[in-house]
Amino acid sequence: MAAIATFEGRTGNTLIDALRPREWNLLVPHLQTWAGAIGRTMQAPGSQVEWAYFPIGKAMASYRISFGDGREVETAVIGREGAVGGIVSHGHLPAFALAVVLFGGTFARVSIKDLETLKAEEPAIAALFNRYADCLLAQVFQSNACNASHTLEQRAARWLIAACERTGSDELTLTQEQLAGLLGVGRSYTTRVIGRFKAEGVVETQRGRLTVVDPENLAAMACDCNTIIRSHFDTVLKGVYPRPMGVPEVVPS
């Protein structure tokens, strides 16, 4: 069984930490810590959603749609700015998408039963998750438009920048084959794109690892979809979406 989480004023998940102290203190005692290994399933299509998960620090999750031929296409990534599963639903409902751990680490989780009770008793908690659901939907909309309109190089640069911002790290545990699958293209395409990024001096690669060494120039190669998503977050949930790489974040005291 996962251990009950103990936090002192801050969890490291910016969505939870956006709650006012009173609501934060009501939610946190219901959290458990959950060790998410890379590839671990958080919810499967058709399964009952029993937990809401909150990535902490460098942990990150991925929502994916599975096809009959075995392919999986990513529809959204969730880092320390968000949550996976049962955020606005009422009662136990089946999951639509597959959710897996993309970058391993610690997650906080709360049972849907406890979360529903808290939302019913505290409108501020329900409102926070309703606003987050709006932001997540905006991310999915923007990602769909990005996939249809922008080049693979722009999309790859956007994905890498977003992953670094959400994990707070310029080093990603990621292979080119995995990146190809997440972007929904063949490995040969991402090999060429990463090769160009390396030639431009914006990334370095080692076995199973990719490091962004020049985030400013990598961001210049990306489309503006991350900026659009961040702007919407800042309008709906100011301070929850991580700052651009290179811009210090304000850590609550």
Image (tube, grey):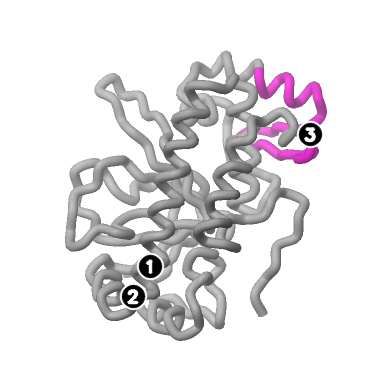
Q: Amino acid at mark 3?
A: Asn
The secondary structure type at the circle numbered 2 is helix
The stretch in magenta equals 193-217
Does the segment drawn in magenta span residue 44?
Answer: no
- Identify the residue under disc 3: 217
Q: Mark 2 or mark 3, which has the lower sequence index? A: 2
Give residue 156's quadrant in the image: top right
- Identify the residue under disc 1: 127
Callout 2–callout 1 Cβ contact below 8 Å: yes
Q: CA distance from mark 1 to mark 3?
A: 38 Å
- Identify the residue under disc 2: 123
Asked whether residue 245 is in view, the answer is yes
Residue drawn at x 28%, y 68% is: 111
Q: Mark 1 or mark 3, which has the lower sequence index? A: 1
Q: CA distance from mark 2 to mark 1?
A: 6 Å
Residue drawn at x 41%, y 52% is: 134
Callout 1–callout 3 Cβ contact below 8 Å: no
- 142 or 205, which lies in front? 142
